[in-house]
Image: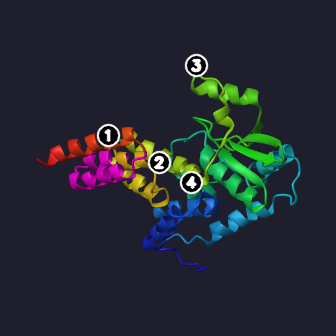
Amino acid sequence: MSDAAPSREEIQARLKDVGGRDDAAIDLGETALWLAALDRPNVALDRYRAHLADLAAALPRGKPSANDMAAALCDMLVRANGYAGDQQNYDDDQNANLIRVIDRRKGLPVSLGILMIDAGTRAGWTVHGLSFPYHFLVRVDHGNARAVLDPFNGTPVSPADMRTLLKSFNAEADLEPAFYQPVAKRDVLVRLQNNLKSRAVQLRRFDRAAELVEHILMFAPDLPPLWRELGVLKVACGLVNEAVAAAEHYQEVAENDAQRHDAAKLVQKIKSHLN
């Protein structure tokens, strides 16, 4: 690999290539670096790739118990490499950019979770992100045994811990079987980028939010709600023709009658701005 920084065109081509792959063929750590590079031009990636390889090399080979694997991932990330959740500046965009996460050794639950998943996968382990809401968690599988860990705090978590964590966000919520289920690597990357997009929307930076949705659509082009969101954001940016194009694509990729009806209404509503 070259030590030169990749061009924006090269990164976009790589992300679009990921968009055409099966989920199992996605290199999670590498793809997260490409996404980070979109916001960090002129940064060469080789030393970050080497760091990802070093994290994996630090894990014990073979397959210890699920609990031992979870403990090893926490030790590798927190104690051996000094990573921590950014408690003081949680909403800092740097926490969702894997390049800056590696530089600063700080991040969000999902960005730190990507480091754990990538390292464990490279070591031959079965490691997934979970569909747990509000706070990203990681699951390690070993045969029929499973262990869950919190990458933000670098600790294993029990079902009781998960319930407490869930209720800290929503007092009315309770654990559901779905919250223990693994999510696809593509969905982990979407969740990473959604952190940036949500903050951009909160700040009313609709141009930035639209750009981030376009980044997601490079590697996840078949998610109809994202095309809808892009259309709405383009309207907020005053780019009505681009909004129409996004809404019409939403109509093309709609997965059911409800989405097709919604898409048709959205196209009509946006086109009314042109008259």
Q: Position of residue 78 (x, y in %)?
A: 74, 49
Tell whether position 98 is magenta: no
Circle 4 is placed at which residue position? 186
From the image, give the main secondary structure of the stretch colored magenta: helix
Asked which quadrant contains residue 121, the reply is bottom right
Identify whether 170 is placed above or below 1.
above
In primary-sequence order, the first of circles 3 and 4 is 3
Disc 4 crowd rating (10 Å Cα; few below 14, some 14-19, many 20+) is many
Task: State the residue position of label 3.
Answer: 172
Tag in front: 4 or 2? 4
Does residue 251 belong to the magenta stretch? yes
Determine whether, in the image, residue 168 is placed left or right of residue 116.
Answer: left
Tell which tag, 3 or 1, sits nearer the viewer.
Answer: 1
Is the Cβ of the residue at disc 3 closer than 8 Å to that at disc 4? no
Left of 10 or right of it: where is 135?
right
Question: In 3D space, how far apart are the residues under numbered discs 3 and 1 (Cα atoms)?
Answer: 33 Å
Q: Tell me the distance, in whole angstroms, between the alpha carbons under discs 1 and 2.
A: 29 Å
Q: CA distance from mark 3 to mark 4?
A: 29 Å
Q: Which residues are magenta?
A: 229-255
Residue 112 location, x and y as percent?
65, 49
Please tell me which residue is depicted at 74% across the width and 41% down the height of the picture.
149
Q: Which residue is mark 2?
A: 196
User: Which of the two labelled residues, at mark 1 and mark 2, occupies the earlier sequence position?
Assistant: 2
What separation in Å lies between label 2 and label 3 (alpha carbons)? 27 Å
